[in-house]
Image (cartoon, rainbow, N blue to C red):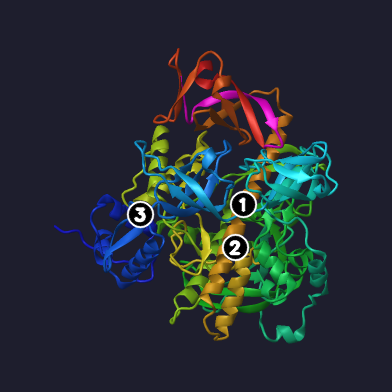
Amino acid sequence: MPKKKRRRNSNSKIGNLTQKILKILKREPGKSFNHKQIAAKLQVDDPNSRNQIVKELAQLKAKKHIEEQDRGKYSFNATSHYHTGKLDATSRGDGYVVVDGMEQDIYIPKNNMNKALHGDTVKVYVYKQRRSKKHEGEIVEILERKTDEFVGVVQMQKNFAFVNTSAEGKMRTDIFVPKNKLNGAQDGEKVLVKIEDWPEKADSPFGKIIKVLGLPGEHNTEIHSILAQYGLPHDFPNEVEAYANTIDTSIKPEEIAKRRDMRDVLTFTIDPKDAKDFDDALSFQVLENGNYEVGIHIADVSHYVVPGTILDEEAYERATSVYLVDRVVPMLPEVLSNNACSLRPNEEKYTFSAVFELDKSSGKVKKQWFGRTVTYSDARFAYEEAQQIIETREGLIPEDISLTGKSYNVDPAIVNATLELDRIAKIMRRQRMKDGAISFDKVEVKFELDQENDPVGVFFKSSKDANKLIEEFMLLANRKVAEFIGKQSPKKTFVYRIHDEPNDEKLAALQTIAGRFGYKMNLKDRKSTTASLNNLLTDVVGKKEQNLIDTLAIRTMSKAVYSTENIGHYGLAFDYYTHFTSPIRRYPDVMVHRLLQHYLDQGKSASEEEYESKCKHSSDMEYLATSAERDSIKYMQVKFMQDHKDETFLGVISGVTEWGIYVEIVDNKCEGMIRLRDIKGDHFDFDQEKYAIVGRKTGATITLGDEVYVKVKEADLVKKHLDFTLVEVKEAIQ
């Protein structure tokens, strides 16, 4: 019986289309296919899907990945030797070029790198494949440098200096700096250096020092180094600060008149206890028909940040706030982020709102309204205080969790609102899970810092009911705003938050590793995959392998990005999704506010090209901010472990490689490496199939997920790296 063709949502985008087409053509290299044959092989038959295939075939032909044999019939271009891609350099000096649409990366030996650096966009010549299955090539042209600024340490010579960049990522060469371009830097200092030239015959590029960061290992130096390495700012230009200070932030009667006045409706905020910017508030009232009106009120940043101003340009460049362990690098100056826009208690504020009439018992949306409002927050709660209300169903807040440091009673109306919102949030969450959403509640590592910003303790933050309450209503607002614009006809340009399907190979790898711990996964189709993932993530809670499995599960997922092209959000199981709820810390939310207002005012569709380029920039900056945040956590972990060198820790093996095993300490989630050559008593070899190392003499096997006892061998603050010594494998002790 022939397979039934799958009908798709007429607007949905085929995930991993490039790979899928190339796979079909590579399978039968001597044969050519037209778009209809490819559509049949992909089991799609709607016009939208066929158009996507036609478009993709044209692009692949332009990139010379495929050849057009007859009109409209294509085959895989096995003779194409030149490709364009991004260089992923290794610390060893060689690298791989990642080319869109090629399943296998192109290996570049050290001597064929030809002055290309990590992240550069390059043109690569691929040699004819030898017996090894590995593509190998040579970089023939650097099309675009990823960056020309690097962080490194000055090594002073008599008449010049070198800046050694080896500790900071994947830079493989020192930078030569003449004496007149040292900018006051001294031997041994950490600096930011800019490459100005790389002469043909020179081994090293020539550069100038643009900023002295301080002495390596010092706290401020290392934090500023992390920011500089990712090209992130740490303070605002004076003219931006000056402009922000001139903005009129008073609440005016004539502006109130243009908005929906919701100051009399019960409104409150729930945020982390150390939060300074409150960008969302919830309002709650019971309507005459017995239904609930719930308002999600968001700081009206776009009222103050006007397109074309230096403030808007700076916010766009930054695109996001960066949350490092010891500081926040905000997107907006403090006068806006912590004052004018922040929905502080007992203050009137301009807001942009999504207001819903919800069925009292089911939580289903009966009516919706979007627009500008003015609100008044009656109270501010920390998550811990709201959690206390949910758990006790009472309003007494004890002094140990109170923001005021004293016990107090919450207004009964707010207690009732919190409990009802929590009940509805749980209904919405259940429905979301039923629809195939994936529940990532990854434990966050947090540090307790002393006055010098030194870590004195580590604690974990997990998501409780109060966090989930806020999360569900923010998701509701984000989804409904995206649906409201996304479903309009004719189509309007909008900023979506999209999330593609996971990569099949990565899912299969997760299945194998989960199987090693005794967990089963069913990857037959979308429904069984998401159900398996959720079961896995629930089953590992509190187990030694939790963090490892959580991390691997997140890595199997595609990266969520911003785009004007909506393909839905896989992880949340939403057909339409955007970011509307955090404009103080995310520029895409500011764009969403502007576009939403523009369309509410019956404006014409905005330029797709302009917004797609802004989406790409926002996604790139988000990635950099996440990398910087990750590095600051690593730095703090190493710093914390420096003071615990003589202690023995229980850890779980979180990675196995040919040069060593990675161990994550159970108590504080710090990860370090035990080098194979340092393990006493035997010579160990790496067994890739088993994710294990095996002793030649003893046959002893140490594998992924095993528990081991370790001590700190070395804690390198500059490289943000921990080396461990293996004390014993846990089983051997029992």
Q: In this view of the protein, which residue sits in the foreground, 586 or 171?
A: 171
Secondary structure found at label 3: helix
What residue does disc 2 label?
618
Question: Quadrant location of residue 636?
Answer: top right
Give the Cα separation between the discs numbered 2 and 1: 12 Å
Q: In this picture, which residue range is highlighted in magenta?
A: 701-719
What residue does disc 3 label?
527
What residue does disc 1 label?
626
**Is 64 above or below relative to 310?**
above
Q: In which quarter of the image is the N terminus?
A: bottom left
Please name the amino acid that badge 3 sits on.
Answer: Lys
Secondary structure found at label 1: helix
Indicate the position of residue 352 as horizontal and vertical percent values.
63, 74
Give the Cα separation between the discs numbered 3 and 1: 30 Å
Q: Is 541 included in the stretch rendered in magenta?
A: no
Q: Judge the density around disc 2: few (<14), some (14-19), many (≥20) Cα neighbours within 10 Å.
A: many
Give the residue drawn at x 68%, y 52%.
197
Mark 1 and mark 2 in contact (Cβ < 8 Å)? no
**Is 120 above or below relative to 577?**
above
Q: In this view of the protein, which residue sits in the foreground, 77 or 374?
A: 77
Secondary structure found at label 2: helix
Of labels 2 and 1, earlier in sequence is 2
Question: Quadrant location of residue 280?
Answer: bottom right
The answer to whether 8 appears left or right of 238 in the picture is: left
Give the residue drawn at x 39%, y 36%.
515
Please name the amino acid that badge 2 sits on.
Answer: Ser
Indicate the position of residue 267 as horizontal and vertical percent values.
67, 69
Q: Judge the density around disc 3: few (<14), some (14-19), many (≥20) Cα neighbours within 10 Å.
A: some
